[in-house]
Amino acid sequence: MTADVPASPLAADSAQPRLRFGIVLLPNFTLTAFSGFVDMLRLSADDGDHSKPVRCSWTVIGDTLAPVRASCGIQLTPWQTFDAADAFDYVVVVGGLLHSGPQAGPQTLEFIRRAAAAGANLVGICTGAFALMRAGVLDGHRVCVSWFHYWDFVERFPGADPDLLIADRLFVIDRRRITCSGGRASIDVAAAILLRHFDHATVQKALRILLVGEMQKGNAPQPHPPGLEPATHPKVKRAILLMEQHVGRALPLDELACKLDLSTRQLERLFKAQTGKSPQAFAKQVRLRTAAWLLTSSDRTVADIASSCGFADASHLGREFRKQFGAPPAAYREKGGAAGDADADAGAGADANAGAMGGARPRPDADGGPEADFDANTRKHPDDDPAGGGRDAR
């Protein structure tokens, strides 16, 4: 009932804002992702930091007006219900924790579908992309998720096209579908959206007030999972993330280099300079570290782990594992990850295993392949959305 709907906490000027954003908060949403996105809207909407919704407006909406709890415990109350809300140019779904209760309910999914049918641009931030996927509005579109939730996405949506799943960059704009890995990248994706409609100076002013400086582009690599050898070159970072994500399927060196817009010789030189190893040797360590993590964190058989990590069979894994960690897989598991008399590289690998795979949980049904040194399921695309968007999209 409209009589029970509170007014927006922000009073707009008499002029209609040029852009309207509707923001849906899922249970246990991440506060940083939400606040970063909204602050970019707030500071771009008006001159200075006056924060009036002049150039754009934002409304927090939900299926009810019940407070929504963030993952940190802070609660926010929607301003309007889905039924009472006007049409939006952008509908932004902010997700968060996946394992702490229900996510998007049927009313939320139906609202997302209605917004898509009306021509709105849909934005999934953090695990908000999962809700867009559940609503069935991402078919044929690239989807960006955090490396931390890559395997969660694969498990929940086994029928999704792996070539369209991206976890090595900050965000992806694909026509009227925009997905973002979350966290601080929500500021960058908000800036990219606003640059579709506002001048550069307006957006840059907001970034500087937030002490961000320059926005990062969508194809900037996500930060490394913990435990990886340090690398500073963005191409090497992306290559490592691709290796981490897809340990089970082979990708030739020349194809990996092509995905990074490099020649094979350039990629080899960069890896040698950044890690002291060849790409092939580094990829093998990634596979072995993944196998080590699975041995100590799951009850899967050695043969199953070998297949998931790209080894021909359990014997093949056993030979390589002993070289790296100084103990066969069964003994390594029995000792809870304590390696035997390994060489220097093996010790480094064992240390990496202690924390490396904290989020990049290996895919349970990954297709293994013998001698798989590389894998990358992300397709090369332009970073910018040629279609544009905005009020004509509604």
Image: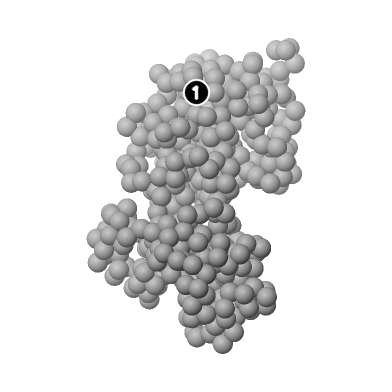
Quarter-of-image position of residue 255: bottom left
Q: Is residue 308 visible?
A: yes
Q: Identify the image's colour scheme: rainbow, by chain, secondary structure or one colour.
A: one colour
Q: Is residue 34 visible?
A: no
Choose between 319 and 70: the one closer to the eye: 319
* 378 in relation to 349, above or below: above
Quarter-of-image position of residue 266: bottom left
Residue at left 64%, top 68%? 296
- For the image, the number of numbered tags is 1
Given the image, on which type of amino acid does mark 1 rest?
Answer: Ala
Q: Residues within 10 Å of mark 1 (few under 14, many from 20)?
A: many
Residue 207 at x, y percent in the picture: 46, 43
Judge from the rendering whether residue 291 lies leftward or rightward of residue 216; answer left or right: right
Residue 371 at x, y percent in the picture: 40, 66
Residue 223 at x, y percent in the picture: 49, 57
What residue is pinned by disc 1?
116
Q: Quadrant of the N terminus?
A: top right
Residue at left 56%, top 61%? 304
Tell me the SS state at disc 1.
Answer: helix
Residue at left 42%, top 29%? 176
Residue 237 at x, y percent in the picture: 41, 61
Judge from the rendering whether residue 161 lies leftward or rightward of residue 21; answer left or right: left
Residue at left 53%, top 46%? 154
* 388 in relation to 180, above or below: above
Choose between 201 and 257: the one closer to the eye: 257
Judge from the rendering whether residue 26 lies leftward or rightward of residue 224; answer left or right: right
* 150 in relation to 247, above or below: above
